[in-house]
Image (cartoon, helix red, strand yellow):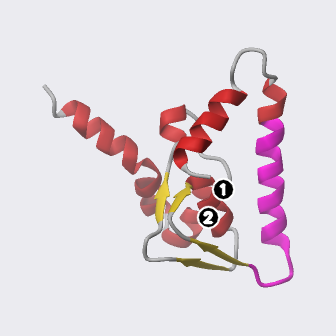
Amino acid sequence: MNRTEYIAFYKSMIEPGFMQKSLERMYNAISQFILKLVSLNKMVVHADSGNVILLFMNIGLACDYRIVADDTVFENPNFELGVVPKGGSTFFLSKLLGANTAAKILLDYLLLMFEADFGQD
């Protein structure tokens, strides 16, 4: 699933008439899956390549080993959707890289947008 597909899927879930409970259930299922990955007593390896949305990066961060191809690009569609990243990216990145670096990575797109808007005076 690429960024465009994820955005279309998310927008279809928040259309009028669609139950908010379904979105909550999806996020709960993702959280439960990631908690299960973390608690496994086995080695878990995650591999990615190409354009990867933040949700799948978060799943990879919950694993013991992460493998990515040279052409891997992690995309964050959450800014376009106006939602908070789900799946533990703030927790896992903070543990791996420290809070400041994690915040910089997760907020980088916002900073670039702010700088672009700010520079147009």
**Residue 106 relative to residue 56: left or right:** left
> What whole-number distance in Å separates the C-alpha atoms at marks 1 and 2?
6 Å
- Residue under pointer 1: 88
From what the image shows, is residue 9 above or below residue 101? above
Mark 2: give few (<14), some (14-19) or many (20+) Cα within 10 Å.
some
Mark 1: give few (<14), some (14-19) or many (20+) Cα within 10 Å.
some
Residue contact between numbered discs 1 and 2, judged by CB atoms under 8 Å? yes
Q: Main secondary structure of the magenta part?
A: helix
Question: Whole-percent x and y of residue 42?
Answer: 83, 83
Residue sitting at 53 percent across and 32 percent down?
82
Question: Whole-percent x and y of residue 37?
Answer: 80, 69
**Residue 31 relative to residue 80: left or right:** right
Residue sitting at 66 percent across and 37 percent down?
9
Circle 1: element type: loop
**Residue 104 relative to residue 27: left or right:** left
Residue 50 seen in this snapshot: yes
Q: Nearer the viewer, residue 95 or 107?
A: 107
From what the image shows, is residue 97 above or below residue 107? below
Question: Whole-percent x and y of residue 98?
Answer: 49, 66
Check residue 92 in the rendering and tell me which mark sits there, or answer none.
2
Residue at the far left: name it.
121
Question: Residue 38 magenta-drawn?
Answer: yes
Residues in magenta, as a range: 24-44
Image quadrant in which you'd find residue 8: top right
Residue sitting at 76 percent across and 43 percent down?
27
Amino acid at the residue labelled 1 = Gly
